[in-house]
Image: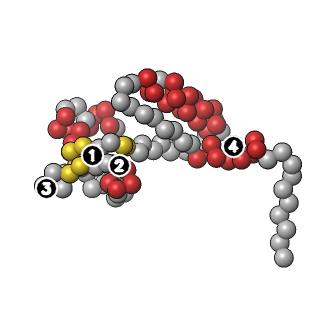
Amino acid sequence: LFDSLVITEEDLFAFVNSETFPDGTAVDRNSEFGGAVYDTSDNLIKVSAVRIGFTLIGNGQGNDWMNEFLDYFENELNGFDGLNVYRFAQTSLDNELAAAVTGEIFLFGL
């Protein structure tokens, strides 16, 4: 969808200044962009950080896809000067906790 909507620099600025995502949900620019600079019309003109999110709706291959996603961002995008990539996947924390726990944990309810 993005590639078909954003062809010129003007398209890009219109896209990032939209008040809604293509699916109609509201854009919270404070949570999507860091170090944002706005012009006098409250249009976004510069950012130092962008949060990009992807949602995978399960087909049973979520972990394989997630691992490829994390590897791609680690290996391919960190090579650009001035670009720092920090990646996180929702199950990353679950996987790290599972790896760190070596014994059984019991849940006691009273």
Q: For the residue carrying disc 3, how many other residues have a C-alpha within 10 Å: few (<14), some (14-19), or many (20+)?
A: few
Mark earlier in primary sequence (3, 2): 2
Q: For the residue carrying disc 1, how many other residues have a C-alpha within 10 Å: few (<14), some (14-19), or many (20+)?
A: some
Q: Is mark 1 on a helix, strand or loop?
A: helix
Q: For the residue carrying disc 2, how many other residues have a C-alpha within 10 Å: few (<14), some (14-19), or many (20+)?
A: some
Q: Dots 1 and 4: beta carbons under 8 Å?
A: no
Q: Looking at the picture, which amino acid does disc 1 mark?
A: Val
Mark earlier in primary sequence (1, 2): 1
Q: Mark 2 points at which residue?
A: 34
Q: Looking at the picture, which amino acid does disc 2 mark?
A: Gly
| 87 with respect to 59 (left or right) | left
In this picture the colour scheme is secondary structure
Q: Residue at x 50, y 45 (%)?
A: 55
Mark 3 and mark 1: Cα distance apart in space: 14 Å
Q: What element carries label 3?
A: loop
Mark 1 and mark 4: Cα distance apart in space: 34 Å
Mark earlier in primary sequence (3, 4): 3
Nearest the viewer among 6 and 35 is 35
Mark earlier in primary sequence (2, 4): 2
Q: Mark 4 points at which residue?
A: 96
Q: Residue 16 carries which label?
A: 1
> Number of numbered discs present?
4
Q: Residue at x 20, y 51 (%)?
A: 38
Q: In which quarter of the image is residue 49?
A: top left
Q: Residue 41 carries which label?
A: 3
